[in-house]
Amino acid sequence: MTESDVVEHSYKILLLGDTAVGKTCFLKRYTDDTFQDAYLSTIGFDYKYKIVTLENGKKVKLQLWDTAGQERFRTIAKSYYKGAQGIILMYDVTSQRTFDNIRKWLTQIKEEASSKVCIILIANKIDSDQRVVSKEDGESLAQSFKLPFFESSAKENINVNEAFKQLVEEISGKFENILRGSKLDNSGPKNNKKKCCK
């Protein structure tokens, strides 16, 4: 194993959102570059991993958790927030309900996840001709919570890799800043106002 093959860090990333918004398809497109129209709803959690190279050349291992969106699994989901550095929060542009529920998901994230977690908002299934949620509404919601926003299609492979790339780079930037801060500031007053991805 050469120095360039060494994995520097491991990041835990959750995919959240209502059932059937396309989280499993989105994840499989990213990890396997495959798409299947019909997937059974995820029961509980599914786990995949991928090793990626950052812009600075470092390699990181992504622990990718595909979560069930059904209401009855949300209490189970709470335990999986622990240790998560990143969250992909997704809704389906063909379902107004899944868009309306984004605020509920953000409330739960605020209650259960680290205050430093990086979140990205995804509007999925833009390949469909049954859209009911406009791009403008998605952008407005993202801006109100200061979240990066992508419209995507797992089916057409639109903005899947781009969304993950931005999230992972933001996690990496924050991680490095925290490490640097802890090394440089071991005495004296500390600045508790750290920039957050949210």
Image: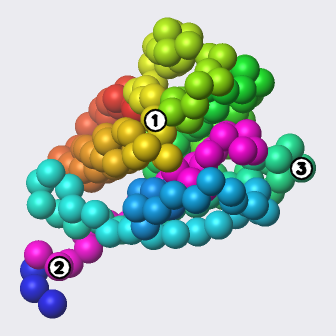
**Residue occupying the point 63% across, 32% down:** 91
Q: Which mark is residue 152?
A: 1
**Residue occupying the point 72% across, 26% down:** 95
Q: Disc 3 marks which residue?
A: 72
Going by the numbered disc 1, the residue's amino acid type is Ser
Regarding residue 170, the answer to whether it shows in the image is no
> Is 57 displayed left or right of 84 in the figure?
left
**Residue occupying the point 83% across, 53% down:** 73
Label 1 packing within 10 angstroms: few (<14), some (14-19), many (20+): many
Viewer-closest of 153 and 16: 153
Regarding residue 176, the answer to whether it shows in the image is yes
Highlighted magenta segment, given as a residue range: 4-26
Q: Earlier in the sequence, mark 3 or mark 1?
A: 3
Q: Which mark is residue 56?
A: none
As drawn, which residue projects farthest toward the right? 72
Q: Which mark is residue 5?
A: 2
Label 3 packing within 10 angstroms: few (<14), some (14-19), many (20+): few
In this view, 174 is above or below 64: above
Give the Cα distance between marks 3 and 1. 27 Å
Q: Nearer the viewer, mark 2 or mark 1?
A: 1
In this view, 31 is above or below 14: below
Q: Label 3: state its secondary structure.
A: helix
In this view, 60 is above or below 15: below
Which image quadrant for residue 107?
A: top right
